[in-house]
Image (cartoon, rainbow, N blue to C red):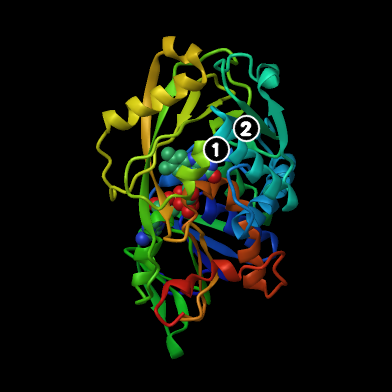
Amino acid sequence: MLTRKSADVIVIGAGVIGAACAHYAARSGLRVLVLDRGPVAGGTTGAGEGNLLVSDKEPGPELELALLSAQLWRELAEELPSGIEYEAKGGLVVASGEKEMAALRDLAARQRAAGVTADEVPADRLHDLEPRLAIGLAGGCHYPQDAQVMPALAAAHLLRAAGGGRVRVRLGEEVTGLLTGAGGAIRGVRTAAGEYHAPYVVNAAGAWGGEIARRVEVDLPVRPRRGFILVTEPLPRVVRHKVYAAGYVADVASGSAALQSSAVVEGTPAGPVLIGATRERAGFDRTLSVEALRRLAARATELFPVLAGVRAMRTYVGFRPYLPDHLPAIGPDPRVPGLLHACGHEGAGIGLAPATGLVVAQALTGGEPLLDIAPFRPERFSPAA
Ligand SMILES: Cc1cc2nc3c(=O)[nH]c(=O)nc-3n(C[C@H](O)[C@H](O)[C@H](O)COP(=O)(O)OP(=O)(O)OC[C@H]3O[C@@H](n4cnc5c(N)ncnc54)[C@H](O)[C@@H]3O)c2cc1C
């Protein structure tokens, strides 16, 4: 049995969020142990697209986190020793009619006031940006800050590049319990291999973050919000930006359990076009939904008619970690000293990972956070709050 002090901090989860927390904690000089029951990026991170979007966010705390993250991703793309397929390609949001265009214009104006660059594109200029786009659209908005990474590579390189060998990763080890000591403070975690001791534990277990919290009788209502992605055969560059219909923003913000299917279309360096993604609350059910895929294909071909003649190569499914107010839980949990959370990022965890990792590292080292993390308080759902 392992019983020695294992690290300054233990991170549960080797998805992109756990990797970013480990990365910035190690850069702050802490010794980090990352535990995952599966492989790196074997949870939702390996099942998502890699959109780093500011364009789909209303002004508010999530947009602030996204703007900080966008800056950090640019820096990481320079710093990480090998490619994470970072592409600063920009986003193009398109409106099908005048009513949608008016709503998009209004959102863009409010986003500009919050620091986002958003350039309106009149209908007759859309094809300068995206030559294969459908005709007859009412216009759009170009967001140069939107970018893209390959999520699994990004998680792996964040872990590998973290400061001077200060991160150890143990895969295939499930955390079965959290250890607490005097006054209920965190002492470490338990796995089948034994106990690992540390004064801090970061819950970066994504859609399973609620289960980790329950192990110390803390309520954190993280639920899965399922999404399918359709992957085409490799194509020459037919889609240059991240392109999506303005209605997508409303789908993201919706709390409905029903199937939603506005498409986000993006090319990849390897050639396949990713068509994402449906949203629905259906538990952890991985059953293939033909209806979800049919809708995705229909929405994508509405935007890019050229895709109608293209074969779908495969599809995959993932579970966004969803909290009822669509904001993640980030930071120390006052109910359990030594426990921090970094989960519940729903459909934006790839984009929000670096800023999350940085503010968690600042909380661990007592540094002044770069932004106000009060809106992400993990205890905000408990009746006492
Ligand atoms: C279809 C789809 C498309 C998406 N597209 C995008 C996008 O374009 N841009 C974007 O920003 N986001 C996107 N997302 C969302 C994004 O993928 C998630 O927000 C993000 O991956 C969450 O990362 P995470 O590290 O919190 O969770 P995960 O990647 O799920 O990592 C959690 C890890 O914890 C481990 N774990 C859980 N319980 C235990 C335990 N008891 N012991 C040990 N290990 C444990 C799991 O094995 C897992 O590896 C998409 C999601 C889906 C489903």
Disc 1 Cβ-to-ligand 1 distance below 8 Å: yes
Residue at the image position 36 percent from the left and 52 percent from the top: 224
Of residue 317 and residue 253, the one placed in the foreground of this image is 253
Image coords of residue 269 (percent x, y)? 59, 23
User: Which residue, given by chain and number where applicable, does mark 1 sit on?
Assistant: 50
Whether residue 210 is situated above or below residue 87 in the rendered picture: below
Left or right position of 240 against 181: right
Tell me if label 2 and label 1 are in contact, CB under 8 Å. yes
Of residue 192 and residue 98, the one placed in the foreground of this image is 98
Q: Looking at numbered disc 1 in the image, what kind of residue is underneath it?
A: Gly
Q: Which mark is residue 85?
A: 2
Q: Looking at numbered disc 2 in the image, what kind of residue is underneath it?
A: Glu
User: The residue tagged with tag 2: helix, strand or loop?
Assistant: loop
Image coords of residue 102 (percent x, y)? 61, 37
Left or right position of 192 against 118: left
Image coords of residue 376 (percent x, y)? 55, 66
Residue at the image position 50 percent from the left and 37 percent from the top: 247
